[in-house]
Amino acid sequence: MTPDAPPSSQHDSPGGVPRAGFVALVGRPNVGKSTLLNRLAGEKLSIVTAKEQTTRERVTGILTTDVSQMIFVDTPGLLEPRYLLQRSMLGEALAALVDADVVLLILDATQGMAGLPQGQALDRLSARRADLVVAINKTDAAEGEPISALAAWTRELFGVDAHRISAERGDGVEALRGALEVRLPVSPFYYPADDMAVQPVRFFVEELVRETIFEAYEQEVPYSAVVRVEEFREAEEPVYIRATIYVERDSQKGIVIGQGGVAIRALGQASREKIEAFLGRAVYLDLWVKSLAGWRKKEAALKRLGYSLPPS
């Protein structure tokens, strides 16, 4: 997987023949892909919550050393889609799986054999077995039998030994990183050595607000909410950010705002603290809430919000 036009900053590594490439992190929902991306990249780039299906779009983190540049791509979970947004999410994951130079399949030791990829996702993984690395995550929270069963399944299906890791604690992650690095193709670096991510700052602001929504609200509200930055005045001090939270129903809008605006003020404060830590600057965060009826299931609404639509 290569950018359409490699950046002009592309350069050789100082340590000799350079390696560079894209590593897609794939797996069922809630297996720990985002936690692992943050651990591998050494920076919090992908939002992490206890709820499933938090990641909706590909999130890219870059790790550059003297000899290699790994571009990690966190993907939505490999799920069975029930509506159009989930079809878009699955399409993002499958596209990353096909395009990447190396595919990292993450299995969840706490889910055991019940958490294995199925259907077309499994077919795509089998087609990439020559470039496949497998990691069994959450081994610190599981008994030995499910781990052994997943390891046996991996050997039988893909002919490789699975790495046993804990993305949360960091156990086994360095060895996994080394196994990924040696599989990268020989290539100049794609991005400047100090770049940490590919997406613009606005994207990460939106994701941090959305992460806070997942933490602050229950039931359908987090899944029905999407955040879009409408204005970003970086030259001001503090940085002025105006963002809109779109929900599907007026009743959800009322929940997000809360009686007398209590809930939205708390959400804004918690989100602002995260954004300030990310930017390293003071921020004035101006949050608005609007209803966009049934946006998760409507093609026009998804296009308006910038989601990639799956083929018909």
Image (cartoon, grey):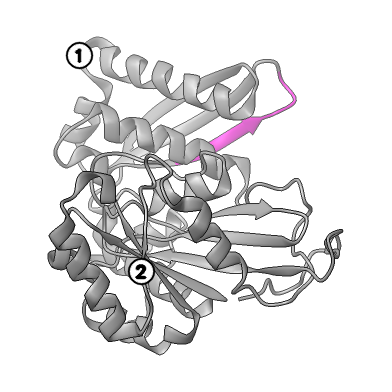
Q: What residue is shown at x 54% (from left), y 45% (from top)?
A: 203
Task: Determine the image quadrant of residue 29.
Answer: bottom left
Answer with left or right where residue 187 lies relative to residue 265: right
Q: Nearer the viewer, mark 2 or mark 1?
A: 2
Task: Determine the image quadrant of residue 178.
Answer: bottom right
At label 2, counting other C-alpha atoms closer than 10 Å, the crowd grade (few under 14, some 14-19, many 20 or more) is many
Q: What residue is shown at x 32% (from left), y 48% (from top)?
A: 54
**Main SS of residues in magenta:** strand
Q: In this figure, which residue is indicated by the disc labeled 1?
A: 259
Q: Where residue 199 sits: x, y (%)? A: 60, 51
Task: Say if 250 sits above or below 99 in the image.
Answer: above
Inspect this view and state whether residue 59 appears. Answer: no
Residue 6 versus residue 124: which sits nearer the camera? 124
Which part of the image, by quadrant, shows the N terminus?
bottom right
Q: Secondary structure at mark 2?
A: loop
Q: Which mark is residue 162?
A: 2
**Range shown magenta:** 228-236
